[in-house]
Image (spheres, rainbow, N blue to C red):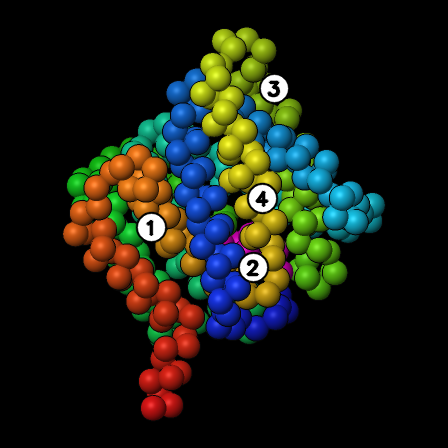
């Protein structure tokens, strides 16, 4: 059964700006998670991430003139979105990062646009697969792999379960992007959708974290861990999902999935600007490949070439 959605289209400058901002926020999540995972178990990290984000958004929501709806069908949609977009991928990625390098996790996570193109083709009428879009996905994957570094691929094949977990997270993100288009049809504003899904995610994760991790038995984390968790919740979750649903509403699932190509660029540029890390030639070549991939998937360049 296909899901009716607004046709995927070329993005304007404002949408590209939002996509870049989202990549910066999500690029920081790997850094924050890398700090937290040294002191906290996976389910506790994910619960704190969505729980704190829910508290932040619930506090801010009234100031924007919104409130959470009470209709059961909307809450069913929030729980479905939370399962696909938060609970499943967050747990899989956090667990995967305990077994594999973050660089390899970034490459595997960057398969999200590929899964999104396939899922959108199978599940929607409007976001059909095209040749230039599929080529763009593979060029983008090559660019990500080059930027992260070929030495990371040496670990490909070991820790298979952890790698499959991150691939499963990428597939879950793709399905979430398709599922999430229904909130525009239901007339739910992006901030309300973001608040509803993280609240539903926290409700689902609370009993799991309490039963599995027994957080009250853990040693109290230090200030760096709490700072990382606050950044993960406020920036990489609360604010990020407001942008996420706004882009999804206006630009489509496939365009939204492009953020996974931009995340490594954001992470590397932040390292150069903030930490003084040096950029290597492979980083510039990788950025160029990702730029070509984004133009191919967006489709505007190909239409101009055909019209010339």
Q: Quadrant of residue 209?
A: top right
Please name which of the two marks, 4 or 2, marks the residue nearer to the observer. Answer: 4
Q: Which residues are magenta?
A: 174-181
248 on left or right of 140: right
- The crowd level at tag 2 (other Cα within 10 Å; few <14, some 14-19, many 20+) is many
Does the magenta segment cover residue 102?
no
Nearer-N-terminus badge (1/4): 4
SS assignment at label 1: helix
Nearer-N-terminus badge (2/3): 3
SS assignment at label 3: helix
Q: Which residue is mark 2?
A: 247
- The crowd level at tag 4 (other Cα within 10 Å; few <14, some 14-19, many 20+) is some
174 on left or right of 52: left
Task: Look at the image and tell me whether residue 1 can be seen.
Answer: no
Q: Which residue is mark 3?
A: 210
Task: Look at the image and tell me whether residue 285 can be seen.
Answer: yes
What's the magenta bit mostly, secondary-structure-wise? helix
Q: Which residue is mark 4?
A: 239
Dots 4, 3 in contact, CB < 8 A = no
- The crowd level at tag 1 (other Cα within 10 Å; few <14, some 14-19, many 20+) is many
């Amino acid at each position: 059964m296909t899901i009716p959605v607004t046709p995927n289209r070329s993005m304007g400058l404002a949408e590209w700006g939002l996509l870049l901002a989202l990549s910066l926020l999500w690029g920081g999540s790997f850094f924050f998670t890398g700090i937290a995972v040294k002191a906290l178990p996976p389910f506790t990290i994910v619960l704190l991430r969505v729980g704190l984000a829910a508290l932040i958004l619930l506090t801010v929501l009234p100031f924007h003139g919104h409130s959470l709806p009470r209709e059961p069908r909307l809450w069913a949609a929030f729980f479905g979105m939370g399962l696909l977009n938060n609970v499943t991928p967050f747990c899989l990625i956090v667990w995967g990062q305990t077994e594999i390098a973050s660089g390899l996790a970034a490459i595997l996570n960057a398969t999200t646009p590929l899964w999104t193109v396939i899922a959108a083709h199978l599940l929607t009428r409007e976001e059909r697969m095209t040749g230039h879009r599929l080529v763009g996905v593979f060029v983008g994957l090559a660019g990500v792999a080059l930027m992260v570094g070929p030495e990371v691929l040496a670990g490909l094949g070991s820790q298979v379960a952890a790698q499959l977990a991150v691939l499963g997270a990428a597939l879950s993100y793709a399905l979430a992007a398709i599922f999430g288009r229904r909130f525009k049809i239901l007339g739910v504003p992006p901030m309300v959708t973001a608040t509803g899904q993280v609240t539903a995610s926290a409700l689902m994760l609370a009993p799991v974290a309490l039963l599995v991790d027994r957080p009250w038995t853990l040693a109290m984390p230090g200030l760096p861990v709490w700072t990382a968790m606050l950044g993960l919740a406020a920036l990489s979750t609360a604010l990020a999902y407001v942008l996420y649903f706004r882009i999804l509403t206006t630009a489509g699932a496939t365009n939204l999935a492009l953020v996974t190509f931009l995340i490594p660029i954001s992470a590397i540029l932040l390292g150069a600007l903030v930490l003084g890390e040096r950029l290597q030639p492979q980083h510039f070549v990788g950025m160029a490949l990702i730029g070509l991939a984004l133009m191919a998937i967006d489709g505007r360049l190909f239409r101009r070439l055909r019209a010339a």
